Each structure stands twice: as structure tokens, then as C-alpha cells.
Image (cartoon, coloured by chain):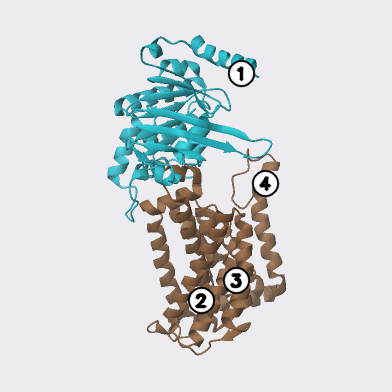
Amino acid sequence: MLEIRAARKVFYRGQPDEKIALNGLDLTLNTGEFGVVIGSNGAGKSSMLNAISGSLALDSGQILINGDDMTGLPVHKRAKRIARVFQDPMLGTAASMTVAENMLLAELRNSRRTLRHGLNAKRLADYRERLAILGLGLEDRLNTRVDLLSGGQRQSLSLIMAVGGSPDLLLLDEHTAALDPRTADIVMDATVRAVETLKLTTLMVTHNMQHAVDYGHRVIMLNAGRVHLEIGGEEKTNVTVPDLIGHFATKTDSMLLAS
Amino acid sequence: MIDFLQTTLGSFVALIPVTLAQSLILGFVVAGIMIPFRMLSFPDLTSEGAFPLGGCVCGVALASGLGPLTAIGLALLTGFIAGCCTAFIHLRFRIHTLLAGILVMTMLYSVNLRIMGRSNLSVFGTETIFDWVPFVQPGFPLAKIIAVGVITLAIFLALNFFFTTEKGTAVRAVGANPVMAEAQGINVWAATIGGIGLAGAFSAFSGALMVQSQGFADVNMGLGILINGLAALMIGEAIVGKATVWRQLLAPFAGAMVYYQLVSLCLAAGMPPPDLKLATGAFVLLMLALPTLRAARGRQAATPRESFRE
């Protein structure tokens, strides 16, 4: 379970270009729940993800995972509980290392790294099996350097790396946005299968309204650094793309009226 | 012409054992340059200061009556600390790695002078590790070649093992992609400080061995060692490659052996020693410029990524 309590973050405080990124954001995501986050640019989606992963320190507020306070912990300590797939395929993998070595790094995310030989036969067999699920042939390229893979293959690898070891929380940061439509579908299918099979608590940020409609248990719309709208349960199953876009429109109109 | 070739070849061959001993010793400083550049993507100049630091510490320790192993131990420790300082300056104050290295290297010059109390110190006649090689007359190149050769082999194997362990793979990940490494639960600070510290220890180790080999310590003994080391590293990478971990680790040691023989050949052929740094610099420049020149002529689609270049 993920809880964000009254998270507040202001950039450039006291300067003319002061920007409130998170304005008392409250959000709870239950164990096993798949939340889809939407919102216009500058609504606070990235700040929220960075605050959860630990790369952005909050001014005030709390981040809790399964009841444990994560607020003061650095990124590498939170990584024991949180896995993340970045938007940029280059960011999520180590380019100059092999597929197998990347898998090893991910496997060791939540355990102590020892002075024993890393890539033993048992692990290689396990990686081959896990990569075969994708159907991209990555299982036969364990010793290929990751920078020789396509963007879609790298992102698929990132996904397999992230869901391995069943993290307490999976963060997906527009992870299909940089891919062509066909590859995006492959990665998205693999994502949904993994999340459903492993019942992962997942928070996915997306700009793709169709994805927001099709996937997840709840749509969370952010605006101006707080939750603007939540659509869950029955309402979520009936929601359409125009409905969601409509909420963007009213928001813009109300902002115009208010000013 | 034949005469010239004969004298050149004659003096070159006569120098091979001495040069080999020297190049084996300097292989460690080349390794101390390679680890930051290649394993951690942390272009670092600390070795230029850590090499004489190791030499000065070893010299003072020997002169004060400590054993050769203790002297080397102290050199390793100070070199490690010097490397840690560079890494910390970069991480904590976000100062560019090269500038952090220059700062430490410059400050180390004063430190080295303070440690020795003067600019050079003779330790001739004190016991060295080369005296312990059995069946060989001490003081001759063969004793040094055997002693340093064994140490080099042991350290190469140890490094090779370490960088394929779980911990070693994590350290390499920090060099390959720090954002990803952090997201995989790796403590980037610890890995960087430890790795650069290890490199500093290697450079200091090389300096300490050099002092035991030549019988004196000098604050200026590190002058230009970095460019020499880079030249050696590039030759090594050109010969053994850098595609796999063990090739990358072999490159500094192999490169040092070939590079110093080449230098010896140039000197034997009558090249004035003062021109040596110019020639080395020009060589490094050429090696770096080649891929760019080839790309400009359209023989290559894109310039390969290279941590020595912008």
C-alpha cells in the first residue's frame, strides 16, 4: 500500500519564477491496486513519482509504503521496496553491460550484494525463462550489450527487470511514450500481464487517454499539484476517452474563469 | 644506415629487462588511471598526485626504518584516502571530476613536500621487497621482473574476479548508468568513493614500488605520469581490446609493457629525452583524434562514444 500525505514541494521558493509542484497532495493506493495517473503538463505527475522514488525531497508531507515511512530515505534504500520503469529506455538499463548483467542488477535490488560470482548457471537459466515470456528473442541474447538492442527491446527488458522480485510498489513513468505504437502495445500487454499475475501495487503515469480508459482500477487526475479527480469502481469501467478529455477541458475553463 | 640500425637495436635489446621491470611497476598506475575512466566513467587526474604520494610515503617509511611491506601498506592507505577525497569533492560539491582531480593533485604536491621535508630522499641500501626473491641476485632487473610480475598476475586475477562478483557488477553499473544503478538499490556514493579510492591506492602502490626499485623518492616523480599512463592504456586497448571485463582489465598492464618498450626504442634510436613528453602528448592526441577524422571522411557513420572526449 502506498500513502502520500499532504506532500508539498515548491521549486525556486521566494524567486519570481516560484513554482508549486506539489500542493498538499494526498493519495492512497491499496495493495494490489493499479492506479493510472493523468494530468496536463506541469500538473505534478513527475514531481509525485520523483517524490515517491526519493529523487525529489519533499518540503513537507510524508510518503509511506505498507505503513513504513520512506520520507527521509535516499533513492537506493527505497529501491528495496520500489521498482521503476523510466520513460527513456536509455535511463532504465546500463547500456554498456549485457542483458544478463542488467537482469542480475535488478535481481539484487532488494538483497545484499556479496563477493560471490554473479552470473551463475542457475541465474542464467532463470533469466532465459523470464525473458522468453516477452517473445522478443531476448532470451537468446543474454550476452548481448544492451546498447545493441532497440528501444522497444530495452524498455521490455526494463519492465522484466522491474517486475522481478515482486516489488511492493511498481512505478511506470510514461514507459511506452517513447516507443512506436506497435512496440508500445507489446510493452503495455506485457505490463498488464505481469501486474495482474503478480498482483503488483502499481502507479502508472500516462498521456495516453486510451490507456487510462483500458487499464487499471482507478484513474487519478492531477492538477496544480493535487488530486483533481478520481474515477474508480463501476464508473471507471464505463468511462470513455471523451469523458476524460472533458475533465481536462472543464479544468482549463474553470482556470480561465477564475483568473 | 646499417650501423645506425645495429647500434639502435643493440642498445634497445640491452635495455629490454630494465624497461620491462619499470613497465611492470608502472602498470599499476595505468590500472589506477583505467579504473576511474573506464569502470566508473569518472575522468580523474588524481594519479598524477597519488603516484608521488605513494613514493614519498614509502620513502619516508623506509628511511625511518620501517619494513618494505609496511612502507607499501602505508602508501596504499594514503593513496586510497587521496582517491576518496577526489570522489568526495566531486559528489558533495558537484565539482567536475577533472577539476576535483586537479585540486587534489595540486594540494598533494605540498603534502608530498611536507611528508618528505625536502624535495628528494635517498633510500638506497634499505631492504626492499626485491631482496626477497629467491635464487636471484638482488638489485638486478630479473629480481624486479619476478617480484612485480607475480604481484601483477595476482592483482589482475583478483580484479578480474571482483568485477564479475555481485558487488563488482554493481560498481560497474555505477559507471555505466548512475541513475539506473541508484534505482536498482546501489549506493552510488559508496561505489564511487570506494572505486576512485581503489584507483588512488593503485597509483600510490606503483609509486611505492618505483621508489623501492630506483632507491630514491622525489616529489617530481609523478610529472607527466598521467599522459604516459593514458598513452599506455590506449595502446593496451588497441592490442587486447576492451569489450569484456577481463580484456579491459588486461589492457593497462599489457599496454604499459608495450608502451615503455616503444619509449625505450625511441630513446635508443637517438630521440632527445626532453622531446619525449611532446611525442607522448602528440600520440595520445592522435589516438583520440583518429575516430573523429575518420568520421569526417565519411568512412564511419558516427564517432564512437569515448569518455576522453566531449
* A44 relative to B234, above or below: above
Residue bearing the label numbered 2: B208
Q: Which residue is painted at 50% across and 79% down in the image?
A: B58
Q: Disc 2 or disc 3, which is closer to the eye?
A: 3
Task: Tell me which amino acid carries mark 4.
Answer: Thr
Q: Position of residue A218 (x, y in %)?
A: 40, 20
Chain B rendered in what hue? brown
Residue B108's disc is: 3
The reply to whether discs 3 and 1 touch (Cβ–Cβ < 8 Å) is no
Dot 3, crowdedness within 10 Å: few (<14), some or many (≥20)? many
Which of the chains bears the disc numbered 4? Answer: B
Dot 1, crowdedness within 10 Å: few (<14), some or many (≥20)? few
Q: Which chain is cyan?
A: A
Determine the CA span between mark 3 and mark 4. Answer: 35 Å
Residue bearing the label numbered 1: A255
The reply to whether discs 2 and 4 touch (Cβ–Cβ < 8 Å) is no
Report helix, strand or loop for mark 3. Answer: helix
Residue bearing the label numbered 4: B292
Which quadrant would the C terminus of chain A be assigned to in this image?
Answer: top right
* B108 relative to A106, above or below: below
Dot 2, crowdedness within 10 Å: few (<14), some or many (≥20)? many
Task: Tell me which amino acid carries mark 1.
Answer: Met
Which of the chains bears the disc numbered 1? Answer: A
